[in-house]
């Protein structure tokens, strides 16, 4: 009976914390939709900067009456999920924290903090470096019309541009969680620094294959994702080795 009451109380607490997170995400969604046009213009800035020196009149088009409306809904949703994710992680941490020892709480806290930070770093890399380079690469395929041919000119669609940007941001943001994943696997004993070091050659192949799958079929974005992931993998080896040395010192003491 006591176990049943304990399970019920834990379930109620979990439901309450998840409900708080959903309410926060919903409120954020409403606010984000009000400012969706400004958020979208912010996302369009890399494209605007890349083409500002062209002698061509640029615009974004929509070919369905509801396309811009749906696009703004997507912008609001992505914004709400992005801003609400840290709140959700905090609520989950508060739910499991009472059942953890003090040293376990200290071990989890760095991962809780570094998760959104690494996601932000991935998003910044896309916004300030990868997107401008990729846009210039794609625009290089435009041609000027001649007497015997028609010009090939980009007229980007509102929803397709958003899909590309969000795909890249989420691909980079999630991929940048690699150090957290490897360090967690090391803590539970699945891998160690020596294992990661000896599997480096296979990881390089996997990373480039993953970059090819997650990004558009162009070398700019693929290399732009693969190189940071390789650096993060090397960082993971270093942090896992550092953690192992720290744990060995504690055991020896």
Image (cartoon, grey):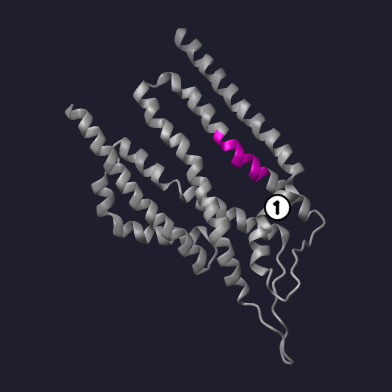
Q: Position of residue 6 (x, y in %)?
A: 48, 12
Task: Specify the quadrant that holds the C terminus.
Answer: top left
Q: Position of residue 242 (x, y in %)?
A: 28, 41
Q: Is residue 130 above or below residue 15?
A: below
Q: Position of residue 232 (x, y in %)?
A: 39, 51
* Residue at the top extreme, as displayed: 1
Q: Position of residue 165 (x, y in %)?
A: 61, 56
Q: Which residue is mark 1?
A: 40
Give the quarter of the image for residue 80.
Answer: top right
Is 228 positioned to the left or the right of 23 in the image? left
Residue in front for this viewpoint, 250 or 172: 250
What count of labels does the image hold?
Answer: 1
* Residue at the bottom extreme, as displayed: 147
Q: Residues within 10 Å of mark 1 (few under 14, many from 20)?
A: some
Q: Do we see residue 191 in this rendering? A: no
Main SS, magenta residues: helix
Q: Do we see residue 225 in this rendering? A: yes
Residue in front for this viewpoint, 8 or 193: 193
Q: Which residues are magenta?
A: 77-86
Q: Is residue 87 above or below residue 191?
A: above
* Residue at the left extreme, as displayed: 252
The residue lying at 57 percent from left, 71 percent from top is 137
Tag 1, which secondary structure?
helix
Give the quarter of the image for residue 168.
Answer: bottom right
User: Does the magenta-highlighted stretch encompass residue 141?
Assistant: no
The residue lying at 74 percent from left, 63 percent from top is 60
* Residue at the right extreme, as displayed: 65
The residue lying at 51 percent from left, 18 percent from top is 10
């Amino acid at each position: 009976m006591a176990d049943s009451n304990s399970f019920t109380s834990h379930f109620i607490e979990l439901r309450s914390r998840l409900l708080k997170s959903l309410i926060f995400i919903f409120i954020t969604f409403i606010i984000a939709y009000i400012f969706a046009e400004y958020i979208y213009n912010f996302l369009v800035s890399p494209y605007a900067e890349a083409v500002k020196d062209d002698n061509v009149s640029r615009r974004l088009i929509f070919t369905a009456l509801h396309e811009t409306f749906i696009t703004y809904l997507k912008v609001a949703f992505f914004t709400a999920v992005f801003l609400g994710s840290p709140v959700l992680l905090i609520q989950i941490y508060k739910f499991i924290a009472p059942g953890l020892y003090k040293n376990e709480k200290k071990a989890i806290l760095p991962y809780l903090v570094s998760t959104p930070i690494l996601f932000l770093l991935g998003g910044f890399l896309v916004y300030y470096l990868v997107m401008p380079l990729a846009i210039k690469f794609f625009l290089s395929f435009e041609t000027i019309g001649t007497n015997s041919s028609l010009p090939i000119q980009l007229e980007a669609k509102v929803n397709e541009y958003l899909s590309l940007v969000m795909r890249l941001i989420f691909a980079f943001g999630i991929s940048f969680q690699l150090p957290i994943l490897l360090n967690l696997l090391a803590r539970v004993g699945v891998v160690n620094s020596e294992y990661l070091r000896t599997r480096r050659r296979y990881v390089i192949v996997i990373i480039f294959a993953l970059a090819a799958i997650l990004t558009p079929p162009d070398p700019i974005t693929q290399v732009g994702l693969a190189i940071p992931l390789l650096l993060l993998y090397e960082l993971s080896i270093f942090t896992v080795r550092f953690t192992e040395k720290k744990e060995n010192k504690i055991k020896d003491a």
